[in-house]
C-alpha cells in the first residue's frame, strides 16, 4: 500500500478482525464512511466503458499511507513556464502538519480525475496530478512549508480559461480552510479566526512568489524581483464572476498564445460568438475563396452555425492559420482583436439541476431520452465534447440522415473516453457553450432520483 496508496475494503475489514480492533468491527461500515467523510480514504471510481454505469468500488486511495516520492519527470516535462501558472498556499510554521496535504489530496481525488503519465498514476507522497478537462491539468504538491498548485494548459498558459483557474483556486482554498479548521479544533488550538496559511502568486519562473496582500493593495501593477507584473497572473486566478466582457486591463491573447494553432473547440467558441458576415469577410481577407463559402452555404442552407464553424476549420486545415493570422486579420479590418478573447471565456451555467445528479455519469436511459431532443447541433456538440472531426464524420456516415442515432453515437463516444469523468455537469456546460442551453437536459433528468440513478449504476455494474 505504501507504494500505490491503494487499499481494498475487504483488506481493511480483515485488519479490523485482529484482536486489537475487535471493538470497532460491529461498526465497520460506519467507521469506513467516516474515513471517507474525513478525507482519509477516497474512492477510486470505476465505470463500465460500455454502459457508463458505476462499477462497485474495489479500490480506495489512502494518500497518508504513501511513502513513494514522485520520481517521474512530469513536473520537468509538462509543467513548463510556457504552459503553467502557479500559486502557493504558504503555512506559517516551517513545515506543514502532514495530515493536511494528505487530506487535501484526498479531497482533490474526489473532485477531479487522477492522471496517468507514462503508464503510472500520478499519486505519490505529497504529490498528485489530475485532469480538469482535456486541456487543463492540475498538480498539487508539498514543498517545505508550501502547498504548490500548478495549472497546466496543453498548449500555452495564455490559453488558460480564467474561470477554470478561479474555480480550481476557490475549490482548493475552501477545502484547505475546512481541513485547517478541523485540524485546529481537534488539537485544541486556541480558537483564532486566523487561517494558518496565506496565498502567494508566482511569476513565470514558478519559484518566485508574491503575497496576496501586496497584490490586493497595489492597484495596476505589482512587480516581482524579475520585473514581471504579477497582477496579470493574479487576475486569472481571481476572475470576477458574471463578467462577460474583457476588463480594461485585458491585453488580448499573449504572444505565446497567439503563436498557437487554435483547437477545434476554440474555433467553435469563436464561431458561435461572431456574426456570419464578419466571419465571411475575415475568411476572404485571409485568402479563402468566395466559392468555398458559397459551397458551404449550399451544403448547409439551414445551418448558419455550421457554415461559420466550417469556415474557420477551412482556414485551419488549408492555410494552417494560428491565432496570429486571425488577430492580424481583425486588426486590418479594424475590428477589435478582443474578439479572440472569447476563446478564453467559459459561459456561466445557472444550473437548476441538483449537484448529486450533475456529478453522475448519464445512464443509457438518459442518453436514449436525450438524443432525440438535441436536434441538428450534433456536430457542434461533438466538437465541444472533444470528439475529432474524423470521428464525427464517420458517425454521420454510419447513421446516414438519422439525427437521433447520430446524437446517440456522439454521446456514447464521449462517455467512453475516461481521461476526464464524463458527468452530466460536463454535458450541461457543453450545451450552454454551444448556445443550445441546457433545458433539454433538465427536462430529461427532472424525474431522476439521484439515489435510484446511483443504485441503477451499481446494479448494472454488477451485471457486467
Ligand atoms: Zn519573479
Ligand atoms: Zn480582451
Image (cartoon, helix red, strand yellow):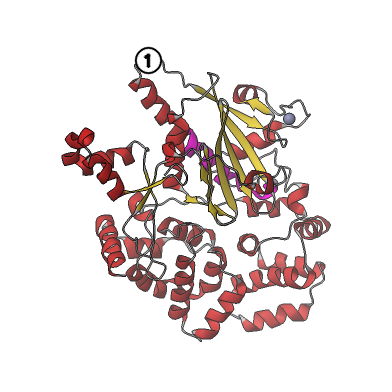
**Would the CB of label 1 be found within 8 Å of ligand 1?**
no
Q: Position of residue 445 (x, y in %)?
A: 33, 62
Q: How many marks?
A: 1
Magenta segment's dominant SS is helix
Quarter holding the C terminus is bottom left
Q: Nearer the viewer, residue 13 or 435?
A: 13
User: Relative to 404, is 225 above or below?
Assistant: above
Q: Residue lying furthest top in this view?
A: 190
Is residue 217 rendered to the left or right of residue 173? right
Using a 10 Å C-alpha cutoff, classify the residue at mark 1 as few (fewer than 14 neighbours), some (14 to 19) or many (20 or more).
few
Q: Nearer the viewer, residue 92 or 249?
A: 92
Query: Does the segment drawn in magenta span residue 172?
Result: yes
Q: Position of residue 136 (x, y in %)?
A: 59, 51
Quarter holding the N terminus is top left
Q: Which residue is mark 1?
A: 191
Q: Residue lying furthest front in this view?
A: 19
Q: Which residues are magenta?
A: 157-173
Query: Does the segment drawn in magenta span residue 159?
Result: yes
Residue drawn at (66%, 36%) of the image: 233
Confirm whether residue 241 shows in the render.
Answer: no
Confirm whether residue 166 shows in the render.
Answer: yes
Q: Position of residue 384 (x, y in %)?
A: 55, 63
Q: Quadrant of residue 212?
A: top right
Secondary structure of the residue carrying tag 1 is: loop
Residue drawn at (68%, 26%) of the image: 219
Q: Position of residue 28 (x, y in %)?
A: 21, 42
Q: Nearer the viewer, residue 176 or 294?
A: 176
Amino acid at each position: 500500500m505504501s507504494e500505490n496508496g491503494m487499499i481494498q475494503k475487504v483488506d481493511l475489514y480483515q485488519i479490523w478482525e485482529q484482536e486489537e480492533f475487535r471493538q470497532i468491527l460491529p461498526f465497520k461500515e460506519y467507521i469506513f464512511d467516516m474515513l471517507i467523510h474525513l478525507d482519509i480514504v477516497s474512492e477510486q471510481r470505476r465505470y463500465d466503458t460500455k454502459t457508463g454505469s458505476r462499477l462497485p468500488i474495489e479500490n480506495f486511495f489512502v494518500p497518508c499511507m504513501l511513502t513513494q516520492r514522485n520520481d517521474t519527470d512530469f513536473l520537468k516535462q509538462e509543467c513548463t513556464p510556457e504552459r503553467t501558472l502557479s500559486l502557493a498556499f504558504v503555512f506559517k510554521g516551517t513545515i506543514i502538519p502532514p495530515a493536511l496535504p494528505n487530506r487535501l489530496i484526498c479531497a482533490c481525488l474526489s473532485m477531479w480525475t487522477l492522471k496517468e503519465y507514462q503508464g503510472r498514476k500520478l499519486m505519490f507522497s505529497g504529490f498528485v496530478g489530475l485532469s480538469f478537462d482535456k486541456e487543463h491539468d492540475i498538480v498539487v504538491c508539498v514543498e517545505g512549508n508550501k502547498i504548490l498548485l500548478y495549472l497546466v494548459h496543453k498548449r500555452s498558459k495564455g490559453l488558460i480559461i480564467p474561470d477554470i483557474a478561479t474555480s480550481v483556486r476557490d475549490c482548493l482554498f475552501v477545502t484547505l480552510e475546512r481541513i485547517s479548521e478541523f485540524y485546529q479544533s481537534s488539537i485544541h488550538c486556541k480558537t483564532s479566526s486566523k487561517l494558518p496559511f496565506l496565498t502567494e502568486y508566482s511569476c513565470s519562473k514558478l519559484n518566485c512568489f508574491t503575497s496576496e496582500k501586496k497584490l490586493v493593495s497595489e492597484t495596476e501593477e505589482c512587480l516581482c524581483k524579475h520585473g514581471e507584473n504579477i497582477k496579470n497572473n493574479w487576475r486569472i486566478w481571481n476572475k470576477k464572476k458574471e463578467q462577460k466582457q474583457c476588463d480594461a486591463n485585458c491585453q488580448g491573447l499573449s504572444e505565446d498564445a497567439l503563436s498557437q494553432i487554435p483547437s477545434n473547440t476554440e474555433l467553435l467558441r469563436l464561431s458561435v460568438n461572431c456574426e456570419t458576415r464578419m466571419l465571411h469577410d475575415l475568411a476572404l481577407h485571409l485568402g479563402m475563396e468566395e466559392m468555398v463559402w458559397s459551397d458551404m452555404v449550399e451544403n448547409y442552407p439551414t445551418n448558419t452555425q455550421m457554415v461559420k464553424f466550417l469556415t474557420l476549420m477551412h482556414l485551419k486545415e488549408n492555410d494552417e492559420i494560428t491565432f496570429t493570422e486571425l488577430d492580424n486579420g481583425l486588426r486590418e479590418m479594424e475590428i477589435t482583436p478582443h474578439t479572440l478573447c472569447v476563446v478564453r471565456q467559459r459561459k456561466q451555467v445557472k444550473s437548476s439541476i441538483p449537484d448529486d445528479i450533475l456529478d453522475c455519469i448519464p445512464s443509457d436511459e438518459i442518453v436514449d431520452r436525450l438524443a432525440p431532443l438535441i436536434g441538428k447541433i450534433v456536430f457542434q456538440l461533438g466538437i465541444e465534447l472533444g470528439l475529432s472531426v474524423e470521428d464525427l464524420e464517420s458517425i454521420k456516415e454510419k447513421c446516414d440522415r438519422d439525427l437521433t442515432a447520430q446524437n446517440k453515437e456522439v454521446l456514447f463516444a464521449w462517455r467512453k473516453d475516461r481521461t476526464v469523468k464524463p458527468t452530466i455537469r460536463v454535458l450541461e456546460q457543453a450545451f450552454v457553450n454551444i448556445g443550445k442551453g441546457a433545458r433539454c437536459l433538465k427536462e430529461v433528468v427532472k424525474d431522476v432520483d439521484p439515489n435510484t440513478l446511483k443504485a441503477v449504476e451499481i446494479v448494472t455494474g454488477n451485471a457486467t
